[in-house]
């Protein structure tokens, strides 16, 4: 009996530690019901991997058993910015992930590469840019969940970085606070989201979503109804 109590106590301490020091990802995620949006945290393994985790959540909704590691490994990688002779060069998030999603000093990736990776695991994903909140509302009316590029800090003026694309010589603009979440429904004026940063299902106000969504180019990835 004493040994049994020790095992129970150790398990309890382990779960509390996970909740305190990081988001509590369910170790039973593979047996969750299909067709439902799950919560999953990007920390501590994927500190800049919100896009990969959002795709994991979306694919899980469709019954695809790709892991976050599978998704991250399939993402093309782009070079982190560096300075050379007074000019800052770097990769392009339109082509791949700038840095690594497992590195806290990295940047991120836009919707095109995420859709391309999505199609490797389940065909039919589309990436669209230049949308607004009304477009998200229209997609949700079809009961279609989507990944949206929003802002972690919609109330703040973002830091904007520029560098030269090391392949094309074009200007690359990165707006700080970039974040990806899965939007899957409405609750009054608020939007239901699965947020990789918190590892929880929650709500985002229409204003906060609109501000961040517009700030980051109105970008989405989703699977249209067949």
Image (cartoon, rainbow, N blue to C red):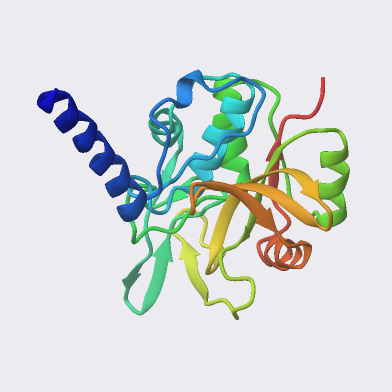
Q: From where the camera sits, is residue 16 visible?
A: yes
Of the 4 image quadrants, the one containing the N terminus is top left
Please name the residue shown 25% across and 34% down the image.
Answer: 11
Please name the residue shown 57% across and 26% down the image.
Answer: 60
Residue 73 in percent (x, y) is at: 39, 33
Of the 4 image quadrants, the one containing the C terminus is top right
User: Which residue is more in the foreground, 48 or 164?
Assistant: 48
Q: Judge whether 61 appears above or below 194 on screen.
A: above
Please name the residue shown 40% across and 71% down the image.
Answer: 88
Q: Judge whether 82 appears above or below 126 on screen.
A: below
Residue 111 in percent (x, y) is at: 62, 45
User: Which residue is more in the foreground, 155 or 111?
Assistant: 155
Residue 180 in percent (x, y) is at: 58, 51
- In the rendered picture of this protein, how many numbered marks are placed on residues? 0
Horizontal arrangement in the rendering, residue 52 relative to residue 5 (left or right)? right
Q: Residue furthest left?
A: 2
Horizontal arrangement in the rendering, residue 160 relative to residue 124 (left or right)? left
Q: Judge whether 61 appears above or below 9 on screen.
A: above
Please name the residue shown 38% across and 32% down the image.
Answer: 69
User: Which residue is more in the foreground, 195 or 52?
Assistant: 195
Q: From where the camera sits, is residue 132 visible?
A: no
Residue 175 in percent (x, y) is at: 56, 68
């Amino acid at each position: 009996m004493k040994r049994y109590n020790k095992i129970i106590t150790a398990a309890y301490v382990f779960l509390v530690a996970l909740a305190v020091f990081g988001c509590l990802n369910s170790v039973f995620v593979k047996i969750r019901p299909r067709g439902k949006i799950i919560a999953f945290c990007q920390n501590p393994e994927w500190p800049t991997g919100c896009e990969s985790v959002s795709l994991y959540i979306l694919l899980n909704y469709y019954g695809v058993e790709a892991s976050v590691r599978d998704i991250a490994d399939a993402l093309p990688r782009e070079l982190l910015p560096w300075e050379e002779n007074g000019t800052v060069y770097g990769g392009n998030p339109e082509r791949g992930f700038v840095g690594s999603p497992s590195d806290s000093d990295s940047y991120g990736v836009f919707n095109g590469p995420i859709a391309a990776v999505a199609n490797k695991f389940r065909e039919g994903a589309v990436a669209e840019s230049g949308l607004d909140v009304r477009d998200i509302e229209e997609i949700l009316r079809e009961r279609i969940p989507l990944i949206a590029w929003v802002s972690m800090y919609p109330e703040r003026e973002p830091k904007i970085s520029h560098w030269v694309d090391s392949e094309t010589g074009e200007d690359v603009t990165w707006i700080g606070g970039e974040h990806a979440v899965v939007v899957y429904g409405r609750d009054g004026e608020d939007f239901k989201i699965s947020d990789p940063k918190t590892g929880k299902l929650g709500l985002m106000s229409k204003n906060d979503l609109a501000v961040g969504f517009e700030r980051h180019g109105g970008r989405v990835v989703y699977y249209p109804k067949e």
